[in-house]
Image (cartoon, rainbow, N blue to C red):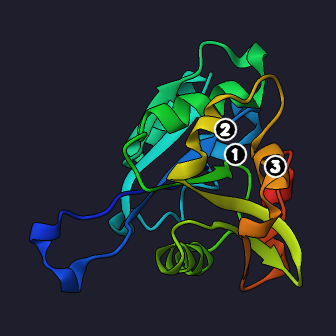
């Protein structure tokens, strides 16, 4: 999923100045993957801390569930273009944000607490790339700063945000998850049990 952040207006007061965030979940698998039509990665989004939450998918069932959860559903009419098409669509849905958090829909063990930890890290260092990790192993989600949006929008095919991250390793800040299970993705409904 992608997380988007914006800066509140200065008129809101300096004590309230901070980067806020939003989320975009990237769904590239079939809706049959999700038991009872639920999006496991969306259930723990801290919507009260997000400027906008976006779900990008080619499947109507997934987008309907996204709308029920309070996310902006964005139809990917070009899924054959690979993950880069989903990244572009999600980013364009919240391009005015200070940061974009990219995540996938299939991390059911991802906790709100770890997402908040990632957001807090971004707020402290909004020019860095922030990635959830476990014991030094990078995973998802990842927050990219606005300065890197042009590179993300230029991705093609099945090339994702990792390509941008590899070009800017000096910007990477690892943020420890609360559990190693949070970095796991599931590929079938049985794994959700």
- Residue 91 lies left or right of residue 12; in this view the side is right
Q: Is residue 146 above or below residue 85?
A: below
Instruction: Say which residue label 1 marks.
Output: 35
Residue 62 can be seen in this image: no
Q: Position of residue 143 (x, y in %)?
A: 61, 60
Label 2, label 3: how far apart the Cα atoms are: 11 Å
First in residue order: circle 3 vs circle 1: 1
Q: Is label 2 in a helix, a strand or a loop?
A: helix
Q: Position of residue 90 (x, y in %)?
A: 53, 36
Residue occupying the point 41% across, 45% down: 71
Label 2, label 1: how far apart the Cα atoms are: 35 Å
Which quadrant would residue 88 be assigned to in this image? top right
The answer to whether the residues at label 2 and label 3 have Cβ atoms under 8 Å apart is no
Other-residue count near label 1 (Cα within 10 Å), few / some / many at <14 / 14–19 / ≥20: some
Instruction: Say which residue label 2 marks.
Output: 151
Q: Residue 162's mark?
A: 3
Q: In front here: 122 or 53?
A: 122
- Residue 150 lies left or right of residue 160; in this view the side is left
First in residue order: circle 2 vs circle 3: 2
Q: Is residue 7 above or below residue 105?
A: below
Residue 92 can be seen in this image: yes
Label 3, label 1: how far apart the Cα atoms are: 29 Å
């Amino acid at each position: 999923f992608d997380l988007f952040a914006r800066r509140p207006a200065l008129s809101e007061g300096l004590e309230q100045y901070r980067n806020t965030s939003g989320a975009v979940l990237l769904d590239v698998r079939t809706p049959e993957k999700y038991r009872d039509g639920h999006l496991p990665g969306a259930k723990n989004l801290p919507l009260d801390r997000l400027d906008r939450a976006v779900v990008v998918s080619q499947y109507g069932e997934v987008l309907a569930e996204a709308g029920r959860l309070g996310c902006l559903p964005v139809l990917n009419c070009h899924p054959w273009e690979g993950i880069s098409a989903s990244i572009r669509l999600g980013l364009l849905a919240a391009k005015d944000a200070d940061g974009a958090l990219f995540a996938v829909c299939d991390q059911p063990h991802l906790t709100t607490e770890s997402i908040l930890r990632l957001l807090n890290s971004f707020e402290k260092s909004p020019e860095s790339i922030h990635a959830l990790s476990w014991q030094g192993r990078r995973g998802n989600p990842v927050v990219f700063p606005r300065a890197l949006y042009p590179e993300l929008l230029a991705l093609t095919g099945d090339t994702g945000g990792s390509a941008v991250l590899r070009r800017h390793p000096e910007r990477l800040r690892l943020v420890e998850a609360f559990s190693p299970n949070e970095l796991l993705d599931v590929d079938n409904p049985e794994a959700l049990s």
